[in-house]
Image (tube, grey):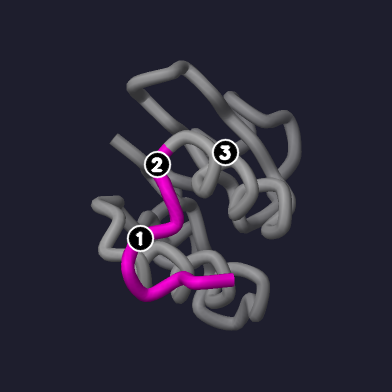
Amino acid sequence: MLQLYTSPQCPYCRKVEAYLDGGGIPHEIRDVATNPEFRDTVLTLGGNLQVPFLVDTDRDVHMYESDDIIAYISEHYGKGPGNDN
């Protein structure tokens, strides 16, 4: 399962969310702005309170940086029908 830790004010988070939504790729959104447990998870797994932060529970992968996240998703989950580029 893909878990994307985000914040509503983050344009890079919206970029990754749009990629996931556009491709119909299943994922969970976890808002660090409203849930302290999600902030703690990002700090514990990644070491920094930075978003977007992706957790792929199936592959035990944790990563920051929107472009890296999109490249990872494209490589492992495909682009999906709405992501032709």
Picture layout, residue 37 above or below residue 65 = above
Residue under label 2, please give it: 77
**Residue 46 on the magenta segment:** no
3D distance between C-alphas at marks 3 and 2: 22 Å
Which residue is rendered at x = 59% and y = 47% of the image?
53
Q: Amino acid at mark 1?
A: Gly
Residue density around tag 2, few if under 14, some if 14–19, many if 20 or more, within 10 Å: some
Q: Please tell me which of labels 1 and 3 falls first in the chain.
A: 3
Query: Which tag is nearer the camera, tag 3 or tag 2?
Result: 2
Do tag 1 and tag 2 residues touch (Cβ < 8 Å)?
yes
Q: Name the residue: 47% across, 68% down.
A: 19
Q: Report x, y in % for residue 36.
A: 44, 50
- Residue 79 on the magenta span: yes
**Rendering quarter of residue 2:** top left
Q: Is residue 56 left or right of residue 48?
A: left
In this rendering, the label closer to the viewer, 1 or 3: 1
Residue displayed at 64% across by 48% down: 71
Q: Quickly name the residue at label 1.
A: 80
**Residue annotated with mark 3:** 42
Quadrant of the snapshot with the C terminus = bottom right
Magenta region = 77-85
